[in-house]
Image: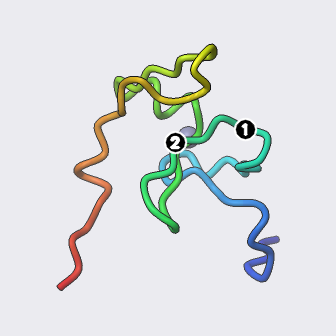
Amino acid sequence: MRDSSSDELTECELCEVVLDPDVDRVFRISDDLVLCPSCASQRGGVYDEERDSWVRFPEVADLVVAEP
Ligand SMILES: [Zn+2]
């Protein structure tokens, strides 16, 4: 059951777990592409809790499809 009308929750691009960007430390690639913390760290992303930001970005080049 998916409710695409809600823009409060999103899904991880890789494992499709439902995420709340306001609560979860998601890595936002773009407006439509989001990774959960687990997938982001598996791809080399490092989150700094003190800075509250990603100090090392995960490898996402293969997820980003350049549109003409
Ligand atoms: Zn994930």
Residue situated in front as seen by the camera: 15 or 25:
25
Residue located beneath label 2 in the image: 27
Answer yes or no: do the residues labelled 2 and 1 have beta carbons within 8 Å? no
Does residue 37 sit above or below 12 in this rendering? above
Alpha carbons under labels 2 and 1: distance apart: 9 Å
Does residue 14 sit above or below 4 in this rendering? above
**Under tag 2, what secondary structure?**
strand
Residue at the limit of the structure toward the front, as seen here: 51
Place residue 15 in its image quadrant: top right
Q: Position of residue 31 (x, y in %)?
A: 51, 67
Place residue 9 in its image quadrant: bottom right
Residue situated in front as seen by the camera: 36 or 22:
22
Residue located beneath label 1 in the image: 24
Q: Residues within 10 Å of mark 1 (few under 14, many from 20)?
A: few
Q: Position of residue 12 (x, y in %)?
A: 58, 50
- Residue occupying image coordinates x 54% and y 17%: 48
Mark 2 residue CB less than 8 A from any atom of ligand 1 = no
Query: On the rendering, which quadrant does ligand 1 occupy?
Result: top right
**What's the residue type where badge 2 is placed?**
Phe
